[in-house]
Amino acid sequence: MAFLGKKDPRLTPAGLPDLRLSRLLSRYTKDDTPPWRVKPVPIQVVDAATSVGLLSTEASGLAIADMIILAFFFLLRPGEYAYSSSPESTPFRICDVHLLIGQRRLNWHACSDADLLATTFVALEFTSQKNGVRGELIGLSRSGSPTLCPVHAIIRRMQHFRQLNAPSDTPLYTFYNGHAWHHVTPSIITSTLRSAVATIGAPLGIDDPSDISARSLRSGGAMALLCAEVDTDKIRLLGRWRSDEMLRYLHIQAYPLTATFANQMLHHGNFALLPNNPLHRLPPIPVL
């Protein structure tokens, strides 16, 4: 009605929300059940979900594993690392990848195989991705693992694309199975993660595989950084959260996060408060 130029019936003549409506909405909020969130995936689930694919000679298995690893370490949104028909989907492409050995930048298409395998640092360049600054790079070094590593995942993707002479605007989630080009989709990622959770999830506190989806990789990577006591501002920068919205993705249930809280409270709970008594209630200052 307001868009049609009529008076907004929800507002009083003073332009404030009607008290009755405000009270009603407030009551609805109190009666609502707590919000449901997908749970973050621990690195054990990432390992289990990628182990089969990394041992496979199939292009599909390798692509799925690599995209899971990249999503976890770079805190990516599903539309950035998996195919989506949404017009708002903005996947990272070959041309968005930067490879470095130390300070030396590599040409992914022309560099030698030895140089490609020696890559020590990979970065993704933002073009139109959500909350990214166009032209800005966000990069990671090797993790120390030969499998669960963003650098190794990018190297495997580049090797696949080089063999096929793929154009530079090819999305990273694309793979060629010998007959045609295919895409890794969010549903494939979700199915792969849930299969891993069904096998090893119970000891990790994830009993229901439906609690996990492709979005769990973004929150899982952020949760891993939080448990490592990385500053929340740095996590926000890596994940491109512009506000405390990041906190909605994280779970206080993570054992390493809260395991030492009781001990810390015991040793730091001995504090005193500054008095806030009005001046007229303070005892008089003795006259010497």
Image (cartoon, rainbow, N blue to C red):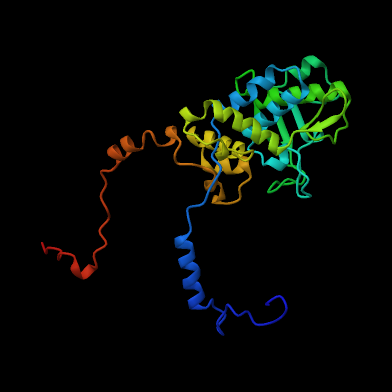
Look at the picture and state if 284 lies above or below 179. below
Task: Pick the residue in front: 143 or 43.
Answer: 43
What is the count of numbered marks?
0
Residue 56 x/y as whole percent: 71, 18
Q: Residue at x 25, y 58 (%)?
A: 275
Residue 93 x/y as whole percent: 79, 36
Q: Quadrant of residue 155?
A: top right
Q: Does residue 105 appear in the picture of this structure?
A: no
Q: Residue at x 60, y 33 (%)?
A: 194
Q: Does residue 209 appear in the picture of this structure?
A: yes
Residue 161 x/y as whole percent: 83, 25
Task: Pick the residue in front: 148 or 183.
Answer: 183
Residue 78 x/y as whole percent: 68, 41
Question: In which quadrant of the rendered image does the N terminus lie?
Answer: bottom right
Q: Quadrant of residue 121?
A: top right
Q: Residue at x 65, y 26 (%)?
A: 141
Q: In the rendered view, does 230 fall on the left or right side of 176?
A: left
Task: Pick the residue in front: 104 or 122.
Answer: 122
Question: In which quadrant of the rendered image does the C terminus lie?
Answer: bottom left
Task: Pick the residue in front: 88 or 35.
Answer: 35
Q: In the rendered view, does 7 fall on the left or right side of 204?
A: right
Q: Quadrant of residue 52?
A: top right
Look at the picture and state if 17 lies above or below 118. below
- List the single residue furthest toward the bottom: 13
